Every structure is written in C-alpha cells, then in structure tokens.
Amino acid sequence: MSSYVMKVSRNGQVSIPAEARARWQTDRVVVVDLGDRVVMRPLPEDPVGDLTGKYPRRPSTDEARRQARSGDVDAARRKRA
C-alpha cells in the first residue's frame, strides 16, 4: 500500500500519481465521502455489468420488483402476527 500527499488546486483538482494510474489502468474514478475521509476507487468500464453479490445473474426489472415486493409482503405479515 502506498500513501501520497497531494495538493488540491483552487478548482478542487488533485493529480493522481503516475504509479497509481498505471496500476489501476483506468481513466475514471469514483470518489466516496465517508465523512472523516475520502476514498478514491477505479471505476470499471462497465460498472453495472461488473456488479456481483446479491444476484448471480442480472434480473430483469420486473423480476427485481417482484422479489422486493414479496419481501415487503412477508414483512407486513410478520408484523401483523
């Protein structure tokens, strides 16, 4: 892991060191404000296509909506019981 000290320009710009740019091999980054710190991460060419986790395959909008609503119905039933 490397640390860099960089100056923020009057326009709010920061230069990413060449070593880090070469390792990331990207021309776009996402900046996340965590309150007490800022995290800069490389943004993939296809951010949506690179998502993994909850769904092993990308569901259609209708499938995702149906799954979300069934969870809401189950929660409402448990609340009434």
Image (cartoon, rainbow, N blue to C red):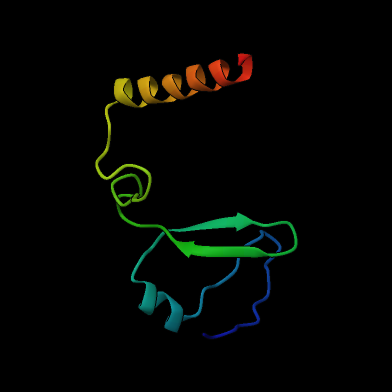
Q: Quadrant of residue 39?
A: bottom right
The residue shown at (45%, 79%) is 20
In the figure, 69 relative to 27: above or below? above
Q: Quadrant of residue 11?
A: bottom right
Q: Position of residue 72 (x, y in %)?
A: 51, 21
In the figure, 7 relative to 59: above or below? below
In the figure, 1 relative to 51: above or below? below
Q: Position of residue 67 (x, y in %)?
A: 38, 25
The residue shown at (64%, 78%) is 6
The residue shown at (70%, 65%) is 37
Is residue 69 found left or right of 59 in the rendered image? Answer: right
Q: Quadrant of residue 10?
A: bottom right
Q: Position of residue 50 (x, y in %)?
A: 31, 52
Is residue 51 found left or right of 32 in the rendered image? Answer: left
Q: Nearer the viewer, residue 61 or 77?
A: 77
Q: Nearer the viewer, residue 21 or 55?
A: 55
Q: Nearer the viewer, residue 35 or 27?
A: 35
User: Which residue is outermost to the right?
Assistant: 36
User: Which residue is outermost to the left?
Assistant: 57
Is residue 54 found left or right of 57 in the rendered image? Answer: right
Q: How many marks?
A: 0
